Image (tube, rainbow, N blue to C red):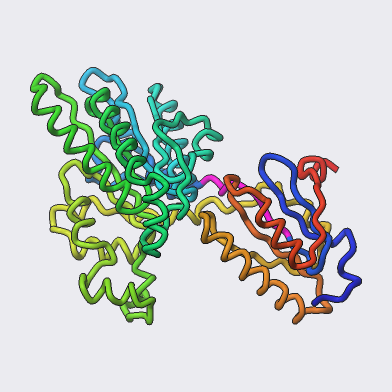
Amino acid sequence: MANSTMLRLPHSPFLLRSSGSPILATSPPNFVCLFASPPRSRFAIQMLATRIFCKSLLRDVKVEDDQPDCSFQLPLLTDHQGAPHPILCLSNGHGEDSIAASILTQLMALGEESEMDLKIEALPLVGEGHTYRRRGIATLGPAKNMPSGGFIYMDLSQLIGDVRAGLLSLVLEQWDVVADWVDRNSGGVILAVGDVFPLALAWLASQRLKRNSSVNSSSRSRGFFAFVGTAKSEFYVREDDGTRLRSAWFRNLELLLFPGSVYFPWERALMSDSYCRLVVPRDNLTAQYLQKYLAQSDRIKVQSLGNPMMDDLEPTGVLSFLANYKPAKFIAVLPGSRTPEVHSNWTQLLVVAQEVSSSFIHDKLVFLVPLVPSLEPGPFMETLLEAHWQPHLLSLHAYNAG
C-alpha cells in the first residue's frame, strides 16, 4: 500500500457523476471514478448520418476537407411529396445508446440544414434509455433493466435469470412497439445499433413493412433499415494481416463451425435483405471480411467509416480540476457498464489498483474509472469501504467553479 503521506488531500480520489453529487474518497492510492456520458462523435458519425440521409446509399458520398457532403443528392428521408419519413432507432446497451444518439443528433442537424423537420424516436432494448432523453430524443416502449444487463450470451445462468425476470414478455412488448410503429409509419427508416437482436428486429420490421406495402398498393413509399454493428470485430480472432489469434474457446468454436467472418451466416442473411441499405462494422478489417462473405450485389452496402466509439475524444474541460493533481500519474480503469458484470469487474480491478499502488509507493497515482449514469454508486462505495477507503461527498460543479 502507498505511503501514508499520500492519504491526505489535495491528492484524494473522487467519484464523479454527471448528475448529482460526486463522492470523495480519501484513502490511498488516489482513486478517481467518473460518472460521465461518452463524448459525442464527429467525423465517423457524420459520415454515418450522411449515408443514411442521402438518397443513394449505394454511391460514395463526396468528402471535402474531412466534411461529408450530400448536397448533390436528394434526401432519402422524404416521400414523393417531399414529406420527411419518420426514423426509429433500435439499440441494446448503454454504449449502443450513446452511439445511436450521436448518429440521431447528426441526422437532426442534417435535417435542419435541409429545412426538414425529422420525426425521430428511439426504442432502447436494454436498460432505460437515459442517454436518449439527455439528448432530447423521444423514447418508446417498455424500459426495464434485466439482471444480466444484456450479456445473456456469455452465461446460461444469466439467460435463465433474465427469463425469470420477464425477458420473454419484455421482448414481445418491444416487438409490439416496433410493429405498431411500422403500421403507423409507411416508408419509415429504422436504424439498428448493436448486435443481432436489434438487427433481427429491424429485419422483422422490414418484412412487416413489405407486407403492408403489398396490401396498400397505392403507397409509393418504401422504407429501409441500416445496421451499425458494435458487438463484433475480426480483431477478436485475427491480426490485421489475417494471422489467427489464440482466442477464447467459444470464439474458436464459432470459427470452427462457421469459418470466415465473425458474423454468422444468419446475421449476414439479415444484412443481405433488400430492405437493408447500409451496414457499418466497427472497423475496416471486419468490413473487409464481411464483404468477402457477402454476395457480390450486397458488398457495396458495407461501409467502413471508422469506429464511432473512438470518435471525438477531444478534451471538454470537465476534468480540468485534475491539473491540481500534477505531477500525479493517471491510470484509467474500465469496469464496464452492465450489471452484474460491472460489479465483479470492479471488485477485481480495485484489488489490482491496490497492487499497482504498492508498486509505486513514491508516486502519486490517480485512477480514473468511468461509470455510466445508470449505475448507482452504493455498491462501489461498499467495496471502497471494505478496502479501507474513506469516501466523502463533493460537488463536481462547485469544485470546477472554484
Q: Nearer the viewer, residue 280 or 2?
A: 2
Question: How many numbered dots are placed on residues in this image?
Answer: 0
Q: Nearer the viewer, residue 191 or 63?
A: 191
Quarter in which the C terminus is drawn: top right
Q: In the rendered image, which quarter is residue 161 located in? A: bottom left
- As drawn, 20 above or below 230: above
Direction from residue 334 to residue 169 in the image, left or right: left
Of all residues, the one furthest to the front in this rendering is 164
In magenta segment, residue 38: yes
Residue for point 77% across, 41% down: 397
Q: Is residue 399 visible?
A: yes
Q: In the rendered image, which quarter is residue 56 located in? A: top left
Q: Residue 162 appears at what percent x and percent y?
A: 40, 51
- As drawn, 366 above or below 123: below
Q: In the rendered image, which quarter is residue 71 located in? A: top left
Q: Is residue 65 visible?
A: no
Residue for point 29% across, 44% down: 226
Residue for point 44% across, 26% down: 112
In magenta segment, residue 327: no
Quarter in which the N terminus is drawn: bottom right
Direction from residue 159 to residue 259 in the image, left or right: left
Instruction: Please give the range of residues in magenta.
Output: 32-40
Residue for point 37% across, 38% down: 89
Direction from residue 29 to residue 309 in the image, left or right: left
Q: Residue 204 appears at what percent x and percent y?
A: 21, 41
Q: Residue 7 appears at what percent x and percent y?
A: 87, 66
